[in-house]
Image (spheres, rainbow, N blue to C red):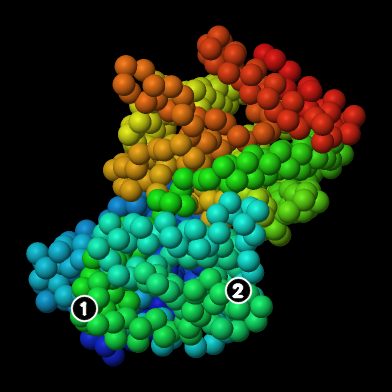
Amino acid sequence: MSNTYNKRLSALRAQMTAHKIDACIIPSSDAHQSEYVADHYKSRTWLTGFTGSMGTAVATRNFAGVWADSRYFIQAETELSGSDWKLQRMKVQGAAEHIDWLCENLAPGSTVGVDGRLFTVGQVRQIERAFSAKGITLRYDLDLISEIWTENRPPVPGKRIFEHAVDYAGRTRTEKLQQIRESMKTAGADFHLISTLDDICWTFNLRGSDVECNPVFYAYSIIGMEKAFLFIDGRKIPASLKVELENDGITVKPYDSVLSFLEILPASKSIAADNNTTSIYLFNRISHAKVIESETIPIALKAVKNQTEIAGTKNAMVKDGVALVKAFRWLEKEVKKRPVAETEIAAKLAYFRSRMPLYYGESFDAIVGYNANGAIVHYRPEVGKCAYVENKGILLIDSGGQYLDGTTDITRTIAFGEPTHEQKKAYTLVLKGHIALAMLKFPKGTKGVQMDTLARMYLWQHNLNYGHGTGHGVGCFLNVHEPPQGFITGLASRGSVAHEPGMLSSNEPGYYRVGEFGIRIENLIFVEEAETFEGTTFYQFDTVTLFPIDTTMIEKSLISPQEKAWLNHYHAKVFEALSPQLNPAETGWLKRKCKPI
């Protein structure tokens, strides 16, 4: 396959020469800045062979590199092996280190080309600032990939969309539109442009299946003070749903007509647009109207779950826990009889979830990493290439489900046989960090970057660390990775957002020893009010994921009485919630797993 990617690189360079371009940047996103994209938009993967969800490719006349962070180092090395594409190991997750490289390696007078649909206004401005100091020009009017990817390109998705019932959403779309319009009034905007797919889905209480594992569909939206507009391939909307939308003051228009709509907005009108989510291609179509640059309004509204969403998410956690009991119990019995393929385990997880009420699909492709594969943070087992799990060693399983009433994401690391002292030590330090974050009480206004250290501090004491963030926001029957909040070491948006009651995030510290094993423990946590003391409001976390944490890997000499109490209380909660849904044999298995330490 490496020869295939080299040929595609040569074809790209031929187009660069034809357009007088010295370098080309190919990101991993689509025109809506999605993390996960439909196959049609996987240009970077098609060009380089690297399949990770995040990463940036850069090609010059004599260099080809893929910038990826530590989550993908092992995966990228393997997938790029043998081709002219070389992994560039990022030092800081989310940083634009490829721009620094271009500034250092391109001569003054050089031109860099990008597809303006794939780069936001903010990104283009940042790149232009960096390039201008070096005498480099940026062109964002080129789609070089479409000129060379002319055979066997998957079509643009055209699957039907459907309504997400208010019984699960908690608020009608008219109520949500009113919320958005109140924020628009405050900002002084007559219209609001929304490009991000999950925010459109949330606003209109609609869902789709254009992107694997994410119940979203390709569309744009513009909210006016009187009417709202949904720009979408009309064939995706059932006739009855279109009528309902029209009755709610929502006009359906063709997907590409968003461009002409923006072009003819009069100078007397203003439109709010987010420079961090709106492409430069779309932004520049606003020809006359006054632009108010502000954050996409639904992002903050969507992050704070309402009571219906909170209740639904907790209900989904019970179903997920029951499915996992069945899956893990099956696995424990099966490995005693034969080696079990990682892919078979992933399939079983999906199968047992599929038997639960309101199941829609997996929330991401399951990460099932046995021994050394567990150290590949975003590992995805493949048939014919995966490992076989035996009744010894360590297995990391990170998986999640999409239910109509909630989205789940859980990681457990389990041992078959007796783990080594080093494995138990690392596991316990990860667990201590997980518990420290779970137990935290914090004042209103506290941000993710302030809390991230708690999950790492015990690892740091032993000169250990992990390269990914400690947590991300999670949607409600939406994307499993949902901005704006989370836990991360840097001051990127995920670390600079204050956590508020109703926000749902993951708590997932880890440790990875390349070539040997990986450890991660992940639960989802809701922010809730704790108390007000001396005029200061304090919040705390409610752990809502329900499945036992492996206690056989704990080095008990490292666990404090307070941490033991937390773990025992958590396991009592798990048993109380799940046991009524299980048969006697499953209940007995769960009771053993939840035994106090």
Q: Is residue 9 visible?
A: yes
- Picture quarter with the N terminus: bottom right
Q: How many marks?
A: 2
Q: Check disc 2 and give the amino acid type.
A: Glu
- Determine whether, in the image, residue 94 is placed left or right of residue 371: left
Nearer the observer, 433 or 1: 433
Quarter occupied by residue 287: bottom left
* Quadrant assignment for the C terminus: top right
Residue tagged by mark 1?
Answer: 268
Disc 1 to disc 2: CB gap under 8 Å = no
Left or right of 413 on screen, residue 99: left
User: Which element type, helix, strand or loop, lies under badge 1?
Assistant: loop
- Residue 450: quadrant of the picture: top left
Nearer to the camera, 245 or 77: 245
- Looking at the image, which residue is at 47% across and 52% down? 302
Report the residue at 58% width, 71% height from top. 210
Horizontal and vertical percent for residue 411? 61, 39
| Residue at horizontal 60 percent and vertical 84 percent from the top | 235
Q: Is residue 532 above or below residue 299?
A: above
Judging by the rendered image, the residue that carries numbered circle 2 is 244
Image height of 458 relative to 346, above or below: above
Residue at the location (55% across, 59% down)? 172
Q: What amino acid is labelled 1 in the image?
A: Ser
Q: Is residue 341 visible?
A: no
In depth, the one of 253 and 350 nearer the eye is 253
Residue 330: % across, % down: 82, 40
